[in-house]
Image (spheres, helix red, strand yellow):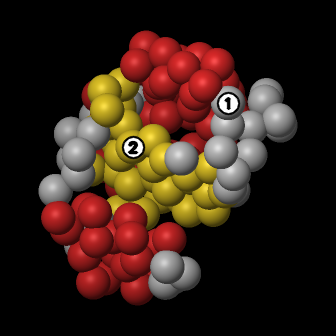
């Protein structure tokens, strides 16, 4: 099972990561996080199927934070390449996307990206709040 959602800002993205950390029974295979100029794309793929109750609860949680997303071809190719085992650096170069995190969901990677981006700009855009 996989879920691809579009989120407005970093805070919402961090809430998903926190949610997954608080539920170790969720069989998360990997989480991919891509930052775009106007928001965040998060793909969560389960390592094994979850029951319909867990699926419904998780979808309801994700709907509260963002919208289900059908990425454009370039972003889809980037997500597929990450899943196939290509390095995030190679994927960023090839598809011109900002891969913030891939693998085990890590708050630290998202927060570090957020801080570096804001520091480089000198202000905090709404998507990084």
Secondary-structure class at tag 2:
strand
Label 1 – label 2 distance at C-alpha: 18 Å
Residue 22 visible at all: yes
Label 1 secondary element: loop
Disc 1: which residue: 51
- Would you say 14 lies left or right of 27 here? left
Categorize mark 1 by other alpha carbons within 10 Å: few (<14), some (14-19), many (20+).
few
Q: Which numbered mark, 1 or 2, is in the foreground of this view?
A: 1
Q: Is residue 30 left or right of residue 73?
A: right
Q: Position of residue 67 (x, y in %)?
A: 31, 27
Which residue shows up at 83% across the image and 37% down it? 24
Question: From the viewer's perspective, is 105 left or right of 5?
Answer: right
* x then y, percent, for residue 3: 45, 41
| Image point (40%, 85%), residue name | 90
Q: How many marks?
A: 2
User: Of 37 and 26, which appears nearest the observer?
Assistant: 26
- Can residue 109 be seen here? no
Is 129 or 69 nearer to us in this picture?
69
Residue 125 occupies quadrant = top left
Task: From the viewer's side, name the closer residue of 58 and 113.
Answer: 58
Q: Which residue is disc 2 drawn over?
A: 4
Residue furthest to the front in view is 52
**Up/down of 127 relative to 113, above or below:** above
The disc label shown at residue 120, or none: none
**Horizontal arrangement in the rendering, residue 96 relative to residue 114 (left or right):** left
> In percent of the image, x 62 and y 49: which residue is there?
46
Percent x, y of residue 11: 49, 27
Identify the residue at horizontal 17%, vertical 64% (top origin).
73
């Amino acid at each position: 099972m996989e879920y691809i959602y579009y989120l407005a800002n970093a805070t919402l993205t961090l809430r998903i990561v926190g949610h997954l950390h608080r539920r170790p029974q969720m069989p998360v295979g990997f989480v991919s996080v891509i930052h775009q100029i106007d928001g965040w794309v998060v793909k969560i793929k389960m390592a094994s199927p979850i029951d319909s109750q867990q699926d419904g609860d998780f979808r309801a949680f994700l709907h509260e934070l963002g919208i289900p997303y059908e990425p454009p071809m370039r972003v889809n190719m980037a997500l597929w390449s990450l899943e196939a085992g290509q390095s995030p650096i190679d994927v960023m170069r090839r598809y011109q996307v900002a891969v913030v995190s891939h693998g085990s969901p890590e708050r630290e990677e998202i927060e570090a990206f957020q801080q570096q981006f804001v520091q480089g700009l000198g202000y905090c855009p709404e998507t990084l709040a």
